[in-house]
Amino acid sequence: MTEVLWNHLTAAELRERAAENAVVLLPVGATEQHGPHLPTGVDDFLAAEVCRRAAELALPHTPTVVAPSVWSGLSEHHMAFGGTITLSLTTLHALLRDVCRSIQRASFRRVLVVNGHGGNMTALNALATELTAELSMPIAITNYFSVDRDLVRDTLDTQGALMHACEGETSMMLAAHPDLVRTELLPEAHGPEITLPAESPDPVYLAVPFDRITTSGVAGYGNAATAEKGERMLTGLAQALAGTLAQNPWKDLLDR
Amino acid sequence: MTEVLWNHLTAAELRERAAENAVVLLPVGATEQHGPHLPTGVDDFLAAEVCRRAAELALPHTPTVVAPSVWSGLSEHHMAFGGTITLSLTTLHALLRDVCRSIQRASFRRVLVVNGHGGNMTALNALATELTAELSMPIAITNYFSVDRDLVRDTLDTQGALMHACEGETSMMLAAHPDLVRTELLPEAHGPEITLPAESPDPVYLAVPFDRITTSGVAGYGNAATAEKGERMLTGLAQALAGTLAQNPWKDLLDR
Amino acid sequence: MTEVLWNHLTAAELRERAAENAVVLLPVGATEQHGPHLPTGVDDFLAAEVCRRAAELALPHTPTVVAPSVWSGLSEHHMAFGGTITLSLTTLHALLRDVCRSIQRASFRRVLVVNGHGGNMTALNALATELTAELSMPIAITNYFSVDRDLVRDTLDTQGALMHACEGETSMMLAAHPDLVRTELLPEAHGPEITLPAESPDPVYLAVPFDRITTSGVAGYGNAATAEKGERMLTGLAQALAGTLAQNPWKDLLDR
Amino acid sequence: MTEVLWNHLTAAELRERAAENAVVLLPVGATEQHGPHLPTGVDDFLAAEVCRRAAELALPHTPTVVAPSVWSGLSEHHMAFGGTITLSLTTLHALLRDVCRSIQRASFRRVLVVNGHGGNMTALNALATELTAELSMPIAITNYFSVDRDLVRDTLDTQGALMHACEGETSMMLAAHPDLVRTELLPEAHGPEITLPAESPDPVYLAVPFDRITTSGVAGYGNAATAEKGERMLTGLAQALAGTLAQNPWKDLLDR
Amino acid sequence: MTEVLWNHLTAAELRERAAENAVVLLPVGATEQHGPHLPTGVDDFLAAEVCRRAAELALPHTPTVVAPSVWSGLSEHHMAFGGTITLSLTTLHALLRDVCRSIQRASFRRVLVVNGHGGNMTALNALATELTAELSMPIAITNYFSVDRDLVRDTLDTQGALMHACEGETSMMLAAHPDLVRTELLPEAHGPEITLPAESPDPVYLAVPFDRITTSGVAGYGNAATAEKGERMLTGLAQALAGTLAQNPWKDLLDR
Amino acid sequence: MTEVLWNHLTAAELRERAAENAVVLLPVGATEQHGPHLPTGVDDFLAAEVCRRAAELALPHTPTVVAPSVWSGLSEHHMAFGGTITLSLTTLHALLRDVCRSIQRASFRRVLVVNGHGGNMTALNALATELTAELSMPIAITNYFSVDRDLVRDTLDTQGALMHACEGETSMMLAAHPDLVRTELLPEAHGPEITLPAESPDPVYLAVPFDRITTSGVAGYGNAATAEKGERMLTGLAQALAGTLAQNPWKDLLDR
């Protein structure tokens, strides 16, 4: 059986996966403005997409289940654009605590939170630390776009890394959900370059409302996107994530 | 444009819908055991399915948007079966508060929470009351299966109302997601009849673990399901829900 | 000894009741406007009255103690009338948690919350579920007016069930606390008929401020009340509640 | 009209009292072990008794309303005796916040919390400070037994101040609720002398479980109680409290 | 080794102190206006100073460690003066809970909170009670200025006890931190006499903003201060506190 | 006047600084094991030291105040070593919220949190974002060791960046607090090299207890430390931080 999605599996099948010590991938995204050309669900869709592909690749050797995705994150900085749903840090903490505790009670021991939203990065790092203590279970965290930074850089023509509604995200949406891209608006899909806060070399961090950075809602060059680049990224990132699972990052922290 | 899903829409499109005073449907389901034959996502899938269909029917006259579904609810009573993700009441409250506040900040004024899980019914009623006060915005609540109880009763052969993983839910899953039904296990898909707590005539309520009621995880007769009955229910419930929207239940509480 | 009230009993007597596996009845009412003719304590007084009578009837066969009543509930919808004290859902949860935990620490194992306020019904159902999990002790819940719906319907002339400051509540107050009824104002004591939200056939629920429903603060026909009808109801409801206790609703969930 | 109890008054009558700028007395007691001879409700009964008497004395010149009493407080130190209901500090804070806010929303501006339990004293002082800031309304606090310490000292034969289930409390119970005193157990009703923590000269405070201090549950000399001493205290304390209200302690903090 | 400050000790040294069953002193002060002549840190500095001196005196016979001081407390009543940092009661509770739990996890069993701010007194009493229950560890509490009230009274010329930015506090600051006293402003450093709320004979307590009491921010006679009086107080209070430790107030509550 | 420390300043002086639109630096450190040779207060001492030096450098052109340091942070990973005080993320959030709100109420508009502990980095980034929204005031965040990474790298002989109780921290302690370094234990002061989690190239993050990484409690080469390197770093980092203040990072977010 090759089904990897938690909500597509029956309880009995999930008990079997737990007995096999399967990894649970928990995508965490956002529902927020993504420029004129992309739907608000991008961060959720792409994190879930890479998780599903990675789990299918990993399944033969590393049993893996993909939990339903947490489709809302920390998007306060996008609120001025409308169409955005944001959680407080405290609510996100409570939600992840309850979900991870349920996963633990369902007899799984290895959880990897797979983030898809730049604005969640530092918070999820901090929450993973906190949940690890609260649940006495090692909660790992990554970003779907960080598992192979070289691939991202080499694939993109105008950017060195993901920005927002940019060449990278638009390309992956063209590959995975072409019907959801407003291609007629691609010419407007560009904006200033940014570095994700968690990766910025600037020593001082200030939460800047996104509408002070870009009027289009885009950072980077969505207008340079192609489905081919998107498919290359999705494929490569899924392979890299599957490779990460094969290395079993929990091995030193768990008995088995 | 006929797209109704929030996360498929762009921020600009959502601003337009808000300007049209669109209704936002917020499906709330569960991820919990559903017998040997159904996947754990049933309550989430069916609530979202009826919402989407209803919104598409309503769109020409009542602009409607379907938010991403809250796929976890109050499922403590199913935890013994495994495969179940449950939230505390406090976390569900916090999550709905943040989501509804974001919907409000996105300039929508009419929200209808559409529940798909019997175990959420009384809690969502109480939370709708509380959120209405907290947000100074009338938060309406219904269950997708309550909008036309006659239809449900008339369609089902073995039951008068929905139970759990039963003739009704199994039929609707055969209609909407036939690939997710383990049809080979349908013969085992039966259990004792129940009444949903919120609709029980018994004056005393006690939270009973579901494994004390049924060993199969089913209450009712999943083995009596057919896709035809399911399609009839999904169609009729969506029509009834669209009809409800047309009546504008908020009209006495809002100026417009 | 026939004393049934917790706060009238000494600690040693309560230890004895706990050793006899007594039931603890916990009345939960409200302090809120009740029309021109009734005091604000009605829901509290009547829940406590039925509990006390039921406990006295039950005592010989089912040892029973009545805790002091929680005299404030969820009354936001009555705030516009003045004279009303309301709790947030979170505070009511915290209060019931601490009280029930104390009852548990006092070595009682069977708790029945007896509600007296329509606005508390769904919340108490949800809280009983939550507290059962939090305390690992089955917290049962009922409404004093639900234990014999036939009696209520048969006794009342103008209504089929309790409404608010209505024929039913006014009659019971005339029976139990005649000095607290402003009989000179009875002619004004009427208003539109309602159905309690938890029992409404309407599939959509919206929290409606009570002053949008009635200017008198009454729903139903307080002007049709008599002490005789009230006494009949109090007697019958107490008997029904005592009968419920005799059936030991906890028996399948507790060892003894 | 001479009724002073909030829950005996109608909403319209309470609106009138608020318009007269009435004081609201909020008794806060406890439900906890009180030796072999006294019921667990003593602190609640006596605080409410003194409040009611004081309000009746004050009514002609100082309109006064007595809210229903908060019958549970901080009684962790009595839990070992059984029969005791205790709240966490956080729950007591939440409860008082909601009750005081409701009083404020009912258009009253002057609230005096009247404590009846030694174990609540410092907490209520701190909570009054906090609530004053949270609600932007001056919340005053006193103890019913502190309003005339000379009277207490002069009336009692064996003690200089109230202790626990002692000469003072037992005397007042004999005066107010003689049927609730187990007079046959009075000979056992004695224990070591204590000073209430908030009034102790000892510079170091440690929360000591009460069963480490007394095996009878009594501190002081309940066996020296008489109804006459009790009536003298109740009368005098009510007069002192009414006198306090006449001085309007809020006058410098409120415009009127 | 005579080092007593936690943050000056290494982890290994602290493990040794814990193995010796050392007492941990936890100073809790405030950062708030202290008149024209004193810095805002006074309450923090003096509590920490007395703790350090007492620990050095106690060390040979009673191993003692001084934790870093909690430099913010409950100072809402000083906010109008500026320069003041205040915590909510809930935050102070959370902070002390985490600090005391960490001390407990570091294998210490005896904690004495040493308060330096009048506005914290009742709250810390209540919090010590609550933390004792929450942590199952006796948390003791004192005020640095209460350990020898006779000394304070005998030393001061114009006051019988500490007030605020007064003869007492100013004298101790002249002794411990003369460079931080604006001596040129001493002539202005006076205001009305007060009694600390926790020690007031007035039976009714109301939180009064400090700017309603004094325009200078001083209560008492800072202008009567001398370094000699300050040194005498610091020395004597430290001796008294060390003497208190020698008596081991925890001895009846802990096995060792 | 050149005093820069909040708690050394009077309320009137702080009101003046606020009127000058001074920056408030808020050091946040930790109290945690720092190997055999360093005291537990290192992260607190060094963050406060760099802040003080930077503020003194900045004062002539950029009025600056240094708040008392938050000496406890997120140190769960060090608990196994003893001597460590850790806060939960929720408590740290509450504490910073109250402190920053007080700073805001004291009329300051520019706050820079200056972190001194690797384990706080991502959490403070997330909390700065959250507090910016909660307080409607831009809360900036940096690490004292990030303001000039080149200087750190160039100064150290064995490391490219700070680790823990390492060449860098030990050198700065030798410069700022030589009496607190156990120089006789320097030979043992070494351990494996690490990268701070927030700066790790590893895409997967897992919270690893520090005792799984190092038995000495050191990561890096404390034994390579010298006071000269420490002084060079402290001087340079303070200059860099002062330079950062001169650039006014808030300028685009505030009117003045």
Image (cartoon, coloured by chain):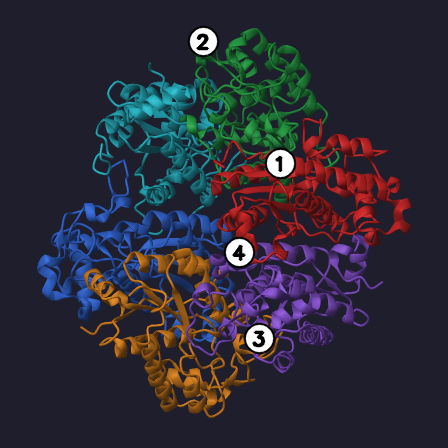
Chain colours: A blue, B orange, C purple, D red, E green, F cyan
* Side (left or right) of F143 relative to D62: left
Q: Position of residue A187 (x, y in %)?
A: 8, 59
Characterize the local packing of mark 2: few (<14), some (14-19) or many (20 or more) Cα atoms within 10 angstroms: some
Is the residue F249 above or below the residue F89 in the image? above
C-beta proximity under 8 Å, tags 3 and 1: no
C-beta proximity under 8 Å, tags 3 and 2: no
Q: Nearer the viewer, mark 3 or mark 2?
A: 2
Identify the secondary structure beneath mark 1.
helix
Q: CA distance from mark 4 to mark 2?
A: 54 Å
Residue at the image position 24 percent from the left and 20 percent from the top: F61
Q: The residue marked by circle 4 belongs to what chain?
A: C
* Disc 2 target residue: E183
Residue at the image position 45 percent from the left and 48 percent from the top: A130
Q: The residue marked by circle 3 belongs to what chain?
A: B
Characterize the local packing of mark 4: few (<14), some (14-19) or many (20 or more) Cα atoms within 10 angstroms: many
Is the residue C19 above or below the residue F155 in the image? below
